[in-house]
Amino acid sequence: MLTRLKNVDTIVTCDICDHVFRHVDLWFENGEIIKIGSLDRIPDAEYDCSDMIVYPGLINVHHHLYQYFTRNLRKVQDYELFDWLKALYGVWKNLNEKTVLYSSCAGMAELMRYGCTTCFDHHYVFPQKSGDLLAAQFEAANVLGIRMHASRGSMDLSEKDGGLPPDSVVQTVDEILKDSESAIRTYHDPNRFSMRRIVLAPCSPFSASSLLYRESAELARVYGVQLHTHLCETKDEEDYTIASFGKRPFDYIASLGWTGPDVFYAHGIHFNDVELDAIAETETKIAHCPVSNMKLSSGVMRLPDMLDRGITVGLAVDGSASNDGSDLMDEMRGAYLLHRLTWGNRAPSGYQILKLATAGSAKVLGRDDIGSIEPGMAADVFAIKKDSSDLLCAVDNPANLFGNVGYHRPCDLVFVNGKLTVRDGVLVNLDENALLQLSRNELNRFLRSI
């Protein structure tokens, strides 16, 4: 199908040359961008974008979608990470396929309304007899039309073993590896423009054993899939690994084979200079979750130092319960302000933050087919109307808009793989009223322990 976005006012490409185009057509065919400019063919579908700014689809590189159903719970609002997790494990043990399906639909629906076209989810809670939770996530992604990377996350280190989670939400290493291999064989598509991929993702050093980390790394490298874990999120984690293993978190995880271009960490706040140098040298990558880090009082990532070293960083909203939102536009604004406050003139510009959420996030996920607008790339884009009173003057600098000013309305158009998924802020493929009713019924069951 040939689609034309006609006479686009502005295209911010986020390509390697940082091109910005004015008053041009943008053409898609079979899910791929084929032309910026004129094309002597009749489109099958056409959209007038003469009053719109078009951007590459945003890419969320760390989420916990199931947490969408534990947002804003009064009981845990003042907790920091370890106490927060301990309180919520008692709720998360009630997860099943319905909970994961509806929470994934709701979380990804919010992401999509605000320009996100690819989501990576770190799902690591697999209670006994909970069903096929990854199947539920991919079903949600398929309904919405979003590009999804799902993780076969894992925990095997319970309280009785010196870990943080209770027995009810951990599994044995053998169970985890068997299911991880099955997930890769069933769902992973490594091809260009793939809509679904699998990542292996033991949760964290305080909930996954050394054996699980080693075995997961070996399995992932046999199949050529990525590795992901939480690392250096809090000082409590640092104290834990020093007390348990005699090593700082990075040294511990590196000793288990967890560095390299196929590895990305979530958070990465508490690295020292030597560790940052090693991350840069090994081409290990980082998912930055600024709003979650602020809400849980975890600290501020050394983003300018990472970018100076050439470390690949992407942007993420993190789990909804530690952020209470799934809006990458809001995350860009939060990231920009956090680093301006912390680092002053060393902080990234608004445009650099946009590139973290697009080209940077694509590199974090190991992809070279998404993250920018140029021929040969996936037709993943979003558009916003520039002619509104709340954007007076702001759109004169569209590349820096989301950081410098912020944008607080759903998108006017969102395309994923060349297909329209959001129009005028409304999801094309999902009945949100039906989802709301189904979700409320499931929430009554899920939150019964609160």
Image (cartoon, rainbow, N blue to C red):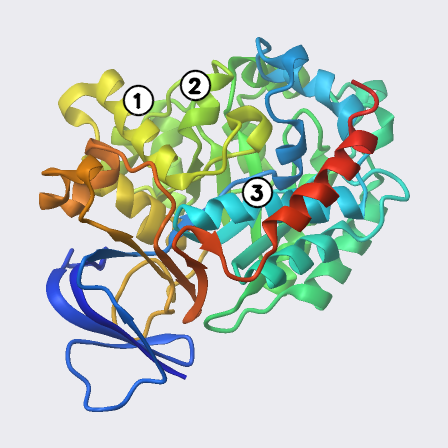
Label 3 crowd bin: few (<14), some (14–19), many (20+), radius 10 Å: many
Say which label, 2 or 1, has the lower sequence index: 2
Give amino acid for label 3: Gly
Choose top left, top right, bottom left or bottom right for residue 346. Answer: top left
Question: Of residues 90 and 48, which is closer to you in this image?
Answer: 48
Amino acid tagged 1: Leu
Residue 258 x, y percent position in the rendering? 55, 42
* Residue 179 spot, x, y in % from top left: 79, 54
Residue at 67%, 50% in the rendered image: 434
Q: Which residue is mark 3?
A: 107
Residue 362 percent coordinates (x, y): 39, 54
Please tell me which of labels 1 and 3 falls first in the chain.
Answer: 3
Q: Tell me the residue at 46%/50% (across/down).
A: 112
Whether residue 214 appears in this view of the structure is: no
Q: CA distance from mark 1 to mark 3?
A: 24 Å
The quarter holding residue 168 reads top right
Asked if disc 2 and disc 3 are in contact, CB closer than 8 Å, the reply is no
Q: Which residue is mark 2?
A: 294
